[in-house]
C-alpha cells in the first residue's frame, strides 16, 4: 500500500515554471496571420532526434545540420499544445526567427528547422550549456548569476515591472501602505520575496506592520497563481506586469494594479552558450529588426483560452458546506487506502464539483464520477455507488487499485504514483502506460509526470489528463490554505457523534 502523502509540496508540481512574455510583442502575431507553414511543422516537437549526442557548434554548423534546437519550458503562455500542435508566444516568435535565418533559402530540404524541446525550467540552462539545445527560451530574466554562465540576447521585453494583482472582491488597496499586515502570495525562486522584504524594511522604519508574503512553492507558476486569484482563493499576489495584463484579458476577476509597483526594471531575453557568438549576433539582429510597433492585441492568446473552463473557488461558503458534508468520508477512506484526504476531496471537486447527483454522458455517476460497471466488478466490488459513502469508497478504492496495480514500480516515488494514478483515473491506465513508454524517445523521464510524461500525454492523448491533474493540484492548494480551519471544524463536529452527515 502506498505511503500516505505527508509532504504537501507534491501539490505544487503544477504545469509550468516559467515567466512568460506579453502581447505587446506584435511580431508574434505575424506568423499567425501570414498563414504560412512553420519550419519544422512536420514534427515541431523533437522526439526522434537522439538527446545523447550533445552539440555545441555555432550558427554555421547549425545550418549545416539544418536545425536549431530551442529549449522551452511548457507553460500556459509561452509554449503549450492544442490538438497535438505547439503554440504560444515563444513558439510563434522563434518560428519568425526561423524565417529570418532561412531568408534566401528556397529549397525546403536546405532550410534550417527550428525544433522545440520541452524542458523542465530548472534544467534549461544546464542543458543549454551541455549542448542538449542551442537556445533557451522561457521568459528568462537577465540576472548577474545567469550572465556568469550564459550569454543573453538584447531584451525583447525591457523594463518589466513587478506589480500587485488583486481579486476584484478583495479588500481595496489604494497604496502600498495598505498592504501592511496583509498576506501577499508570489511564486518561489524569483526575486519577488526579496523585493517585498525591501518594502518591509521601510515599513518597519515607519512603524508599519510588515507584509506577510508567502512563496507558493518551487513548482507553481505565475499563471497558476493568477488563476487562483481570479477564483478568489488568493486575494493578493505579485506578478510581472506584462503577464498580469495578458491574463487579465481572460480572467475577468483580476485587478491589475499598475500603479502599485513592487520593483521596476527587469529585462527578459533569450539565452545562448557563450561559445556561440554567431548565433547571438543573429538573434540580436532579428530582435532589432522586429521592434514592437502598433499593438495588435492578444488575439492569439484569446483564441486558445477565451472559452476555456477555468477553476472555480472551492472555498466559497456554498462550496465549503459541500466539503463539510463529505469530509468524514474522505478522511475515512483516505486513511484506509493511504491517501491525503484533501487530495481526494480535490479530485472529487474536479470530477463533480462535489455534486453527488452529477451524471456524465458516459454514465459515470456521483462525487467520484465512477462508472457503475467499474465499481461493481472485481477488484472494486462496490455495486451501490448511488449512495454517497459507497460512491466515495468506490472511487478511492479504484484510485488505489490504479496506484498499486499499474504504478507500483520502485522507480516511482509516492508523489509520482499519485500523479500517475490521477492521470490514469481520467484517461485510463493503458493510455498512461503507453505514453510513459514513449517518453524516453522524447528525451523525457518516464517516472515523472510534470514536465515529462505530461508532455507525451499532450502529444499522444490530448490536454484533458494534463489539465485534470493540474486542476486537482490547484484545488488542493485551495483546500490546504484553510486546512487548519477545516481541521478545527472537524474536531468540533466530532464532539457530536450522534449528528450524522448524509
Image: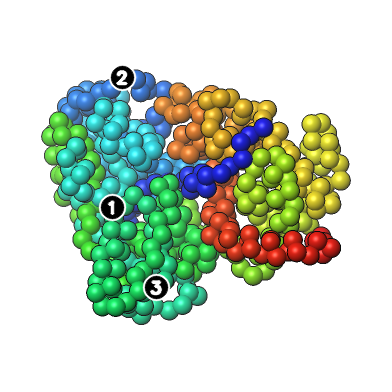
Q: Earlier along the polypeptide chain: callout 3 or callout 1?
A: 1
In this figure, which residue is indicated by the disc labeled 3?
181
Q: Is residue 323 above or below residue 202?
A: above
Mark 3 or mark 1, which is nearer to you?
3
Q: In the image, residue 141 lies at what x, y percent?
A: 25, 50
Separation of marks 3 and 1 at Cα, in angstroms = 43 Å
The nearer-to-camera label among 1 and 2 is 2
* Secondary element type, mark 3: loop
Q: Is residue 298 left or right of residue 306?
A: left
Residue 247 in the image, given as x and y percentages of width and height: 42, 61
Q: CA distance from mark 1 to mark 2?
A: 34 Å
Is 251 on the left-hand or right-hand side of 190?
right
C-alpha separation, residue under disc 3 versus residue under disc 2:
53 Å
Residue receiving disc 2: 53
* Residue in front for this viewpoint, 171 or 283: 171
Q: Does 284 sit left or right of 297 as displayed?
A: left
For numbered disc 1, what is the local secondary structure? loop
- Note whether 319 is above or below 108 in the view shown: below
- Residue pictured at 35% horizontal, 23% vertical: 51
Numbered circle sitting on residue 27:
1
- Quadrant that contains the C terminus: bottom right
- Figure quadrant of the N terminus: top right
Amino acid at each position: 500500500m502506498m505511503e500516505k502523502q505527508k509532504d504537501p509540496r507534491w501539490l505544487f508540481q503544477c504545469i509550468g515554471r516559467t515567466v512568460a512574455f506579453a502581447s505587446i510583442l506584435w511580431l508574434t502575431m505575424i506568423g499567425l496571420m501570414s498563414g504560412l507553414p512553420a519550419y519544422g511543422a512536420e514534427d515541431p516537437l523533437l522526439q526522434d532526434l537522439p538527446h545523447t549526442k550533445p552539440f555545441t557548434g555555432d550558427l554555421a554548423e547549425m545550418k549545416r545540420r539544418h536545425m536549431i534546437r530551442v529549449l522551452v519550458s511548457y507553460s500556459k503562455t509561452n509554449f503549450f499544445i492544442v490538438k497535438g500542435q505547439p503554440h504560444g508566444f515563444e513558439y510563434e516568435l522563434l518560428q519568425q526567427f526561423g524565417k529570418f535565418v532561412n531568408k534566401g533559402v528556397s529549397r525546403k530540404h536546405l532550410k534550417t528547422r527550428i525544433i522545440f524541446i520541452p524542458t523542465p525550467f530548472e534544467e534549461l540552462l544546464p542543458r543549454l550549456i551541455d549542448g542538449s539545445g542551442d537556445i533557451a527560451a522561457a521568459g528568462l530574466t537577465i540576472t548577474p548569476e545567469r550572465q556568469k554562465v550564459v550569454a543573453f540576447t538584447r531584451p525583447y521585453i525591457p523594463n518589466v515591472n513587478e506589480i500587485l494583482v488583486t481579486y476584484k472582491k478583495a479588500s481595496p488597496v489604494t497604496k502600498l501602505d495598505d498592504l501592511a499586515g496583509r498576506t501577499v502570495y508570489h511564486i518561489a525562486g524569483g526575486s519577488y520575496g526579496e523585493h517585498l522584504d525591501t518594502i518591509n524594511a521601510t515599513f518597519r522604519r515607519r512603524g508599519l506592520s510588515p507584509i506577510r508574503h508567502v512563496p507558493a512553492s518551487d513548482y507553481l507558476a505565475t499563471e497558476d497563481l493568477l488563476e487562483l486569484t481570479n477564483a478568489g482563493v488568493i486575494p493578493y499576489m505579485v506578478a510581472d506586469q506584462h503577464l498580469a495584463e495578458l491574463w487579465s484579458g481572460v480572467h475577468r476577476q483580476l485587478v491589475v494594479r499598475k500603479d502599485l509597483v513592487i520593483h521596476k526594471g527587469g529585462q527578459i531575453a533569450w539565452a545562448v552558450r557563450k561559445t556561440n557568438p554567431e548565433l547571438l549576433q543573429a538573434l540580436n539582429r532579428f530582435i532589432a529588426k522586429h521592434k514592437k510597433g502598433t499593438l495588435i492585441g492578444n488575439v492569439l492568446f484569446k483564441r486558445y483560452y477565451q472559452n476555456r473552463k477555468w477553476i472555480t473557488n472551492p472555498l466559497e461558503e456554498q462550496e465549503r458546506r459541500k466539503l463539510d458534508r463529505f469530509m468524514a468520508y474522505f478522511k475515512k477512506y483516505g486513511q484506509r487506502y493511504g491517501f491525503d484526504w484533501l487530495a481526494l476531496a480535490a479530485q472529487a471537486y474536479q470530477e463533480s464539483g462535489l455534486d453527488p447527483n452529477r451524471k456524465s454522458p458516459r454514465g459515470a455517476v456521483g462525487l467520484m464520477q465512477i462508472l457503475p460497471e467499474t465499481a461493481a466488478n472485481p477488484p472494486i466490488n462496490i455495486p451501490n455507488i448511488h449512495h454517497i459513502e459507497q460512491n466515495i469508497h468506490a472511487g478511492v478504492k479504484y484510485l488505489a487499485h490504479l496506484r498499486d496495480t499499474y504504478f507500483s514500480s520502485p522507480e516511482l516515488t509516492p508523489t509520482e504514483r499519485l500523479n500517475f494514478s490521477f492521470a490514469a483515473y481520467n484517461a485510463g491506465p493503458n493510455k498512461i502506460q503507453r505514453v510513459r513508454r514513449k517518453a524516453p524517445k522524447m528525451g523525457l523521464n518516464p517516472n515523472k509526470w510534470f514536465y515529462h510524461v505530461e508532455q507525451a500525454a499532450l502529444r499522444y492523448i490530448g490536454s484533458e489528463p494534463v489539465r485534470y491533474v493540474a486542476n486537482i493540484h490547484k484545488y488542493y492548494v485551495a483546500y490546504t490554505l484553510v486546512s487548519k480551519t477545516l481541521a478545527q471544524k472537524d474536531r468540533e463536529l466530532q464532539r457530536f457523534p450522534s449528528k450524522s452527515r448524509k
